[in-house]
Amino acid sequence: MSRPNYNNAEKGTLEVRSPQLAGNPDLAKSEKKPVDLDVFPVQSLKKDAPVSPSNVAKPPPQPPKPQKMSISKYVIFIIWYNSYRRFFSVIFTLNFIALGFAAAGLWPYAQKYPGALVVGNLNFAVLMRNEIFGRILYLFVNTCFAKWTPLWFRLGCTSTLQHLGGIHSSCAISGIAWLILMLVNQFKSKYIYNDSILAFGVATVIVLLITMTAGLPWVRNTHHNVFERNHRFFGWTALVMTWVYTILSNTYDSTNEKWDRSGVYVIRQQAFWYTMGMSLFIVLPWICTRKVAVDIELPSPKVAVLRFERGMQQGLLARISRSMVMEYHAFGIISEGTHAKYHYLICGVQGDFTKSLVNDPPRKIWTRQLKFAGVSNTSTLYKRGIRICTGTGLGAALSTCIQSPYWYLIWIGSDQEKTFGPTISGLIRRHVEPERLLLWDSKERGGRPDTMKVLKEVYDYWQAEVVFITSNYVGNFEIQHGCKALGIPAFGTLWDFVSLCRSPLACDPR
């Protein structure tokens, strides 16, 4: 995939003042001298004014090509070694040090309760992907630490919540490693174990390894349907086999080679309760699954806008599917607030699933009524911020700017009014004031803007604390690295795997 052309930039002038700054005494005290923004002038977005290129000033002569920003190797490394990899490194290292002690016979607990270490790790792996636990965690952080805590602490909270996947993957791999060690020790003393225990142990390891392989970033991003089917169904199979293996291991008395241990003995074992917790964490989100009515608007061949009943808080994502259990796809939720009658999803028409929404629009669709929180949900932590997005990335960004007057929206796209239709344009027109809105129509303006120049000027003018980015891989990579180089706190979309050739700088897998 080639890099987008950032060189055909055009600029205008816009001198704006924020009414939010004027109306807030605390922020007004720290207000700096107004900055003249050397950016694209937005339309007035009055109630009856159409959001169309006719309201936009004609572009001035094309400016000189902007110089490419030099990104140091230190910046590349810091962004690459993010919280995901730090979580993974710490948990993986601690587990494998413990494995070494256990293999050497220097840790009595691991020899006495090996099953607890297996399912304990798997328990935490599942918990990190549980939507209910995630919502509780986001609610706790947003309620307790919003705005009053130091900025570095709030940034750390956002980074931690965004990268819980590092705990998920490291605990899953560690749990499989503990199971292999447990099985090896049982085979060393196989004369005291029943063959059925050993057979189920081997089968459980194989199924878990298939589950892990299906969840690798390369599989997840390049073969999404393979990931969905295998990671989920082999995961469920592994759960059933873990139950069988746990019960068999604890009901068999190796001292007299008999199945004479009671159910009370099994219930008292740590492995039993860890497996019970893991089962609850897997099942609970599915209890919230419902088939609900949906209205689909098709403003253009590129986009489908889905409308559902019920308003939502900002920063949430919805998973939808035509089937109850297969091929769920996540999209950012647009809503005017919990009081609203509807919420919306913007679906870019690309894969088989989104194409089917256009070719065969459903009247009802499966979704989980309890939505899961995305990184935008932590926007509550910050006093002021910027949401920059490209194309359909608006779906994950717009709610934050609609529901908070302290967030500035930068939306870069092509012929937005025609592509995304009157519903989305109307939401912007009604709720996002011109002084905190920058729309860049690359078709009308002849190309993309000098994104980092625009972003830096808006960041200084708006006195923002943080920038949230929703873009494709290349756009996210360049903006996030540019922000790091300029000292601007920024969080971007998580990309698990991309080919090295897609950027000259390297990959940022998460």
Image (tube, helix red, strand yellow):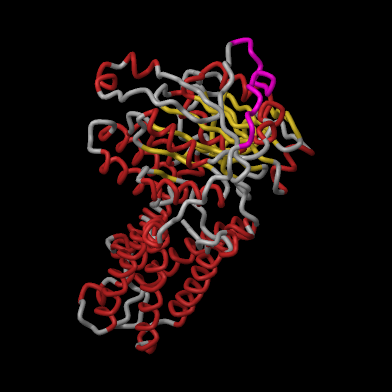
- Residue 224 magenta-drawn? no
Quarter of the view holding residue 270 = bottom left
Q: Main secondary structure of the magenta part?
A: loop
> Which residue is more in the foreground, 336 or 439?
439
Residue at the top extreme, as displayed: 48
Image coordinates of residue 42 in percent, x first then y, are 56, 23
Q: Residue at x 60, y 35 (%)?
A: 10
Q: Is residue 268 left or right of residue 49?
A: left
Residue 403 in view (yes/no): yes
Above or below: residue 276 compared with residue 456: below
Above or below: residue 231 compared with residue 59: below
Q: Is residue 57 left or right of residue 410?
A: right
Q: Residue at x 40, y 86 (%)?
A: 187
Q: Is residue 34 left or right of residue 360?
A: left
Above or below: residue 302 compared with residue 325: above
Residue 392 in view (yes/no): no
Quarter of the view holding residue 146 = top left
Q: Which residues are magenta?
A: 47-62
Image coordinates of residue 7 in percent, x first then y, are 60, 46
Q: Residue at x 51, y 34 (%)?
A: 397
Residue at the right extreme, as displayed: 359
Quarter of the view holding residue 220 = bottom right
Which quadrant is home to the N terminus? bottom right
> Which residue is more in the foreground, 112 or 168?
168
Report the label total. Answer: 0
Q: Is residue 498 left or right of residue 119?
A: right
> Which residue is more in the foreground, 140 or 453?
453
Image coordinates of residue 475 in percent, x first then y, are 55, 47
Image coordinates of residue 118 in percent, x first then y, are 36, 68
Above or below: residue 467 compared with residue 172: above
